[in-house]
C-alpha cells in the first residue's frame, strides 16, 4: 500500500490567509521558483529542466517548432535545405541583435556550432551536439552545417536545445562567463544572476516578431532557486511568488481552495524510469541477476502511483521513451504487470527472502515521494533500498562513480520529439549508460543515423524491445506537471514542459 502525504503546512495556510501581497501586477513582475539549481545557465552546460526553460527565454535557435502544430518555421534562419544526407545549408535572418548590442550573423552560428561540436569542450549532453562535424560561413548570412553522419533528426535539434550564442562574446567569456553574465538574443534578457540563488530578467523590447516568439507582455521575470518544496508552497500561498510547477498532487489539490491561486495540470514529455548499474564496477553485483531485475519490475505498483502520486493526465509507458516521439514503439517490449507473488518467487530463486534481504542504494533527484513509494514496494519483496537524494549534478556524478545500484530517473529529452534525444542517452555507451549492451547500442545507432524513416522505426522498436526483454531498465509512466499560479496570471501549458513567460499576461 502506498502511504501518501496529506494536507498542507498549517503555517503556510496561516501565512496565506494573513499575508500581504507582494507579487503580481503591482510591479509587472512574475516571480517564479524552481527546485533545481543549474550548474551553469549556459544551455550547453546543464541538463536540468530549468536550463531548458532558460534556454528558450534568453536565447534563440536557428529553427522554430510550433508547440501546437509541430510545424517547423524559421527563427534565426529564414530557410534551410539539405544538400545531401550530411550537409545542411541555411539562409540567416538579418537585423537581429544580441542583448549586448552585437549584430547577429553567420559568424555567431559558425563559432557556436564549432565550439559545442568538439568533444573536448565537454558539452554536458553530448547527444544534442555529437552529430555536428563543423559549420562554415558561405556568406554574411549563409551557413553550411556538415554532419558526422546522416542524422535526420537534426532539424528537431536545431529547433530545440541547439541555441546560438554571440560568437564574439562567447569566445571572450566562455561557458563560465556566459553563466556569470548570460547574453542571448531571446525575448528576455538577464539583468542579474546571483549564482545559485536567483536570476532577474527583463523584456527585450527590440525582439523581432519574425522570430516566432514575441516581446513579452509582462516586463519583468524573477526566477528563484528554492530546492525545498514546502518553502515554495508557503511563498506562493503568501503571494511572494506568482508561479511554481511540479507541485505534488496532494498539495495541488489542497491549494485549489485558496482564493487567490489557480491550479492547472499539464501533460509533459517527461518520462520516469528506473535504470540499473550492470557494469563490472556495480556496487551491488546481485542487480546483474535478471531475476532480481524482473522482480523489481513486477513489484512497482505503477497504476496506483499514477493515480495517487502523479496526476490524471499521466500515461503508463512500456518502453523508455515518450509515446509521441518519433520511433517510440513498444510493440516488441515485454510487459511486467504488478505481481508481488511473481516478484517474491523470482527473488526466492535468486536466493533472497525473509531471512536474507538484498541491501542496495537507490539514487534520485526529484519526485522524492515517488522514490519513497517504490522503496516501500521493494521492502515487500525483501529488498532494503537506501535512498540517496541529491541535486541532479551530484546524482549524475554519484552514478558515474558507480556508487548506486539503481537510479530513479526522469528525462524530458530536452523537449525534442524524437527517440534519439532520450533512449540513447542511457543505452548507447554514453556517460550515463549503466547497462553497456552492445546490441542495444548498435540498434540505437542505426535508428539515429538511418535516412529511411521506416528503417529508423524498425531499429528503435527492436532496441526498445531488447531493453525490456533484458530488463536493462524499468519504464514507469510519464509525468504531468501541476502548476500553481497567481489567479490573475493568464498562461497556457505545453507538453514540452516549457512555461512560455513571453506569452503570459495579467487577466
Image (tube, rainbow, N blue to C red):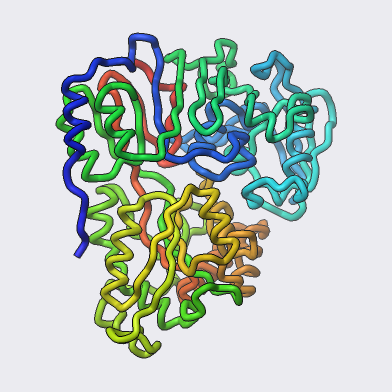
Left or right, residue 94 beside residue 261? right
Q: Nearer the viewer, residue 175 or 9?
A: 9
Quadrant position of residue 401 = bottom right
Report x, y in % for residue 483.
32, 35
Q: Quadrant of the N terminus?
A: bottom left
Quadrant position of residue 334 = bottom left
Q: Identify whether 255 is placed above or below 408.
A: above
Image point 53% across, 27% down: which residue?
57
Q: Identify whether 505 is placed above or below 492.
A: above
Q: Nearer the viewer, residue 314 or 383?
A: 383
Q: Identify whether 250 is placed above or below 328.
A: above
Left or right, residue 62 beside residue 413? right
Q: Identify whether 472 is placed above or below 44.
A: below
Quadrant position of residue 223 = top left
Image point 68% across, 46% down: which residue?
123
Report x, y in % for residue 302.
29, 63
Left or right, residue 323 beside residue 91? left
Q: Nearer the viewer, residue 261 or 499?
A: 261
Q: Quadrant of the C terminus?
A: top left
Image point 70% across, 13% down: which residue?
101
Report x, y in % for residue 414.
53, 44
**Is residue 323 at all visible to an observer of this figure?**
no
Amino acid at each position: 500500500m502506498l502511504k501518501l502525504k496529506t494536507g498542507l503546512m498549517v503555517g503556510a495556510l496561516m501565512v496565506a490567509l494573513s499575508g500581504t501581497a507582494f507579487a503580481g501586477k503591482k510591479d509587472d513582475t512574475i516571480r517564479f521558483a524552481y527546485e533545481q539549481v543549474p550548474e551553469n545557465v549556459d544551455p550547453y552546460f546543464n541538463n536540468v529542466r530549468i536550463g531548458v526553460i532558460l534556454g528558450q527565454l534568453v536565447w534563440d535557435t536557428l529553427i522554430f517548432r510550433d508547440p501546437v502544430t509541430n510545424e517547423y518555421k524559421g527563427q534565426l534562419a529564414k530557410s534551410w535545405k539539405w544538400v545531401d544526407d550530411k550537409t545542411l545549408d541555411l539562409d540567416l535572418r538579418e537585423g537581429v541583435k544580441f542583448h549586448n548590442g552585437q549584430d547577429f550573423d553567420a559568424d555567431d552560428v559558425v563559432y557556436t556550432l564549432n565550439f559545442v561540436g568538439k568533444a573536448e569542450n565537454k558539452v554536458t549532453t553530448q547527444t544534442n551536439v555529437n552529430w555536428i562535424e563543423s559549420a562554415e560561413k558561405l556568406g554574411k548570412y549563409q551557413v553550411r552545417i556538415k554532419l558526422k553522419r546522416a542524422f535526420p533528426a537534426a532539424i528537431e535539434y536545431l529547433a530545440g536545445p541547439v541555441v546560438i550564442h554571440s560568437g564574439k562574446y562567447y569566445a571572450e567569456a566562455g561557458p563560465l562567463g556566459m553563466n556569470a553574465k548570460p547574453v542571448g538574443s531571446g525575448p528576455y534578457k538577464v539583468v542579474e544572476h546571483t549564482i545559485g540563488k536567483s536570476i532577474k530578467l527583463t523584456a527585450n523590447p527590440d525582439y523581432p516578431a519574425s522570430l516566432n516568439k514575441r516581446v513579452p507582455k509582462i516586463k519583468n521575470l524573477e526566477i528563484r532557486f528554492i530546492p525545498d518544496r514546502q518553502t515554495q508552497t508557503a511563498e506562493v500561498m503568501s503571494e511572494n511568488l506568482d508561479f511554481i510547477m511540479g507541485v505534488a498532487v496532494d498539495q495541488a489539490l489542497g491549494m485549489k481552495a485558496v482564493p487567490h491561486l489557480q491550479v492547472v495540470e499539464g501533460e509533459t514529455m517527461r518520462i520516469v524510469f528506473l535504470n540499473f548499474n550492470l557494469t563490472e564496477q556495480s556496487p551491488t553485483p546481485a542487480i546483474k541477476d535478471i531475476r532480481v531485475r524482473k522482480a523489481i519490475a513486477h513489484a512497482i505498483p505503477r497504476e496506483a502511483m499514477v493515480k495517487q502520486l502523479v496526476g490524471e493526465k499521466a500515461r503508463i509507458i512500456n518502453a523508455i521513451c515518450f509515446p509521441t516521439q518519433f520511433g517510440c514503439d513498444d510493440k516488441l517490449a515485454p510487459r511486467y504487470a504488478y505481481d508481488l507473488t511473481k516478484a517474491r518467487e523470482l527473488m526466492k530463486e535468486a536466493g533472497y527472502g525473509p531471512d536474507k534481504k538484498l541491501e542496495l542504494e537507490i539514487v534520485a533527484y526529484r519526485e522524492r515521494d515517488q522514490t519513497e513509494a517504490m522503496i516501500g514496494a521493494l521492502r515487500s519483496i525483501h529488498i532494503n533500498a537506501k535512498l540517496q537524494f541529491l541535486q541532479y549534478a551530484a546524482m549524475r556524478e554519484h552514478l558515474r562513480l558507480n556508487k548506486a545500484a539503481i537510479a530513479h530517473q526522469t528525462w524530458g529529452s530536452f523537449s525534442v520529439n524524437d527517440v534519439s534525444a532520450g533512449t540513447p542517452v542511457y543505452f548507447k555507451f554514453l556517460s550515463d549508460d549503466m547497462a553497456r549492451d552492445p546490441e542495444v547500442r548498435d540498434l540505437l545507432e542505426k535508428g539515429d543515423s538511418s535516412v529511411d524513416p521506416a528503417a529508423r522505426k524498425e531499429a528503435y522498436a527492436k532496441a526498445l524491445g531488447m531493453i525490456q526483454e533484458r530488463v536493462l531498465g524499468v519504464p514507469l509512466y510519464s509525468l504531468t506537471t501541476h502548476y500553481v499560479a497567481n489567479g490573475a496570471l493568464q498562461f497556457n501549458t505545453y507538453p514540452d514542459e516549457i512555461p512560455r513567460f513571453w506569452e503570459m499576461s495579467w487577466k
